[in-house]
Amino acid sequence: MYSYSYLFRFTQSVFEHIGLTEREANQASEILMRAELRNISTHGLVRLPEYISLWKNNRITVKPEFKILHETPSTALVDGGKGLGLVTAPKAMNLAIEKAEVAGTGWVAVRNSYHFGIAGYYAMKALEKDMIGITMTNANPLVAPTFSLKGMLGTNPIAVAIPAKDEPPFVADFATAPVSRGKVDEWYQHGESVPEGLVQDERGILTNDAFALQNRGAIRTLGGDRVHASHKGYCISAIVDIFSAVFSGANFGPTVVPTLGYVKGKDGMVDNGIGHFFGAMRIDAFQTKDEFKKNMDDWIRTFRAAEPVEGEERVLIPGDPEREAEAVNMLNGIKLGKKSFEGLKSIAEEFDLDFDTSGFDNA
Amino acid sequence: MYSYSYLFRFTQSVFEHIGLTEREANQASEILMRAELRNISTHGLVRLPEYISLWKNNRITVKPEFKILHETPSTALVDGGKGLGLVTAPKAMNLAIEKAEVAGTGWVAVRNSYHFGIAGYYAMKALEKDMIGITMTNANPLVAPTFSLKGMLGTNPIAVAIPAKDEPPFVADFATAPVSRGKVDEWYQHGESVPEGLVQDERGILTNDAFALQNRGAIRTLGGDRVHASHKGYCISAIVDIFSAVFSGANFGPTVVPTLGYVKGKDGMVDNGIGHFFGAMRIDAFQTKDEFKKNMDDWIRTFRAAEPVEGEERVLIPGDPEREAEAVNMLNGIKLGKKSFEGLKSIAEEFDLDFDTSGFDNA
């Protein structure tokens, strides 16, 4: 086990080592650590070696220019200047919030950015200002539209955070594909098979083989097949791709230049990075704050009080499990997975930073 | 077979009979007929008896006041005054478009409204102004959140329409549940069973029984079960419910007063109608119009050119099948289903309107 503050400080030192300012390194570490706290470790410290590799290969710069290229009272297009998503995205979300303060809502599309951690982090930033937060991003093409032989879309997450009054906020934060690449990788590493209906093989046929993604297979869209409405999952993932990458002029769908070794990029691909989309809506844009929050409390209480089916404890409100995990992990510490641990250890060795390896052994 | 114009005129005469102005009746008929043209007949003329029944029971008024209760430069809250959705929704979408002309984007939440036909109709209105259109609505509670014994959410459609340059627009228009109530009703009427994973019975267990919805069962959310990410489908349907009904102060989730005989409402329920959410975003809110449309053409062509799996003809762009159906149905005429036909016939008899029944027999 590691304490939150130990891992936070180590991560910050890594980001400072590659040239982020103290403030940026602090911000970037906070985002990754929030994923660890919320038990979304697929988007936490395990990504650090990927960021370092992008930096080494000059795919990202640590001194990016944040440029507003186009704007209206409620919108802006930002060029992230090939910075880390963890550096660019917080600024873009702030810009959406500033727009919303004046226009009621603010919407910012970003290009030339990279992986930004958990989408929910940015959506939740809006809560502090009594706003609804919305985040989307596109990602490496691994998801096959209905009837497509190949992965054309990313797992393309959406996050929506909505404030309430006495209840904790509603925070939905999910990849629009039914499983993440990280989850399939985990099944593969543990020698487990993939449940039916989630992944297709190189011929486009449903498979249980967790190696399929590394062998020209693809994740199916939410729904799984046409009978179970995979075309709706395709629509949802496509909307995220278009809002993130067509609105911004980033690389969309299959033109995203992969950050993963086993997803093959084409020679000579133009790299405008991936795209993000951020939204902020003042809750008093539609009703008074009090009315809105009371309504939202009612919604949350109604759904939390829903009778569960036999064998299940309760109906969850989106954000409940992650919020509960945050409290537990902050208190008890964070258990690193093997891949995360080895990534941090090898970064520490390479950069000659102190890293206490006993935290892994004593887990 | 019936010609488009024959059914349009008949429908208009029905709406005029109950007291809509000529202009409103024309608009309402256009929306229902658009559903027929696009082969979304579950949201077309089959709904006319339901509207008449709401009117007879004083659930709706044909002279509603359209009242803007609250606004910011980019948003508004509208009270639909218990009008037909087909009358109120076009005005609300226009308001979103007007807001977008000034602020870059416009967002309108509506309460005290009722069923508004196909969501896609309103989203597509934005296309005429070189805008992206977004529509959501909540609906009768028939869909069970993950682990819930009962239906708490509507089939809650989302429509997103995005203009392109030389390509036809991207138009996604879909219920967020994997099947519509109408589809399950059809299976029941045809004596067919429900494919596994779509519907649960009165104990919350997956069933193939198409009668289950009428026997305290519920539709599952997109994904079907936890392993296949039904919790993501729950998040999506919940977001539509909150945007449509919490933002507006309409009846949300299970508090929606049913318009269907077999969904039981509770005595003394407050009826603020259902809620809608409309969005319009200028395509030049993020880039120049030319850049945006070129990017969107690229997106559409890339996905249309995707290699299909063996046995399938092509990867579809959302909106392709409906657009193709429109062209065919406009040319060849519209074939009414038995339920639609009988509904129209009985309305004609009751209101003493001419209706040519031979169009059904000669289909």
Image: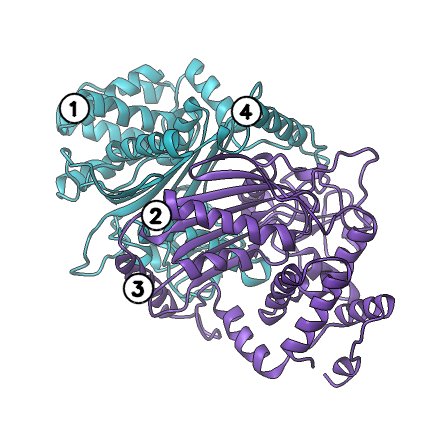
Chain colours: A purple, B cyan
Distance from the alpha carbon under mark 1 to that under mark 4: 35 Å
Residue B331: % across, % down = 44, 13
Residue that carries the numbered disc 4 in the rendered image: B164
The answer to whether one can see residue B194 in this image is yes
Same subunit, labels 3 and 4: the answer reads: no
Q: Residue at x 65, y 32 (%)?
A: B303
Q: How many marks?
A: 4
The answer to whether one can see residue A197 in this image is no
Chain of the residue that carries numbered disc 2 in the rendered image: B
Distance from the alpha carbon under mark 4 to that under mark 2: 27 Å
Residue that carries the numbered disc 2 in the rendered image: B244
Distance from the alpha carbon under mark 1 to that under mark 2: 27 Å
Residue B280: % across, % down = 41, 34
Above or below for B106 versus A222? above
Mark 2 lies on a secondary structure that is helix
Same subunit, labels 1 and 2: the answer reads: yes
Kindly indicate whether the residue at mark 4 contacts the one at mark 1 (C-beta within 8 angstroms): no
Q: Nearer the viewer, residue B141 or B134?
A: B134
What's the amino acid at mark 2? Ser
Mark 4 lies on a secondary structure that is loop
Q: Answer left or right for B258 relative to B20.
A: right
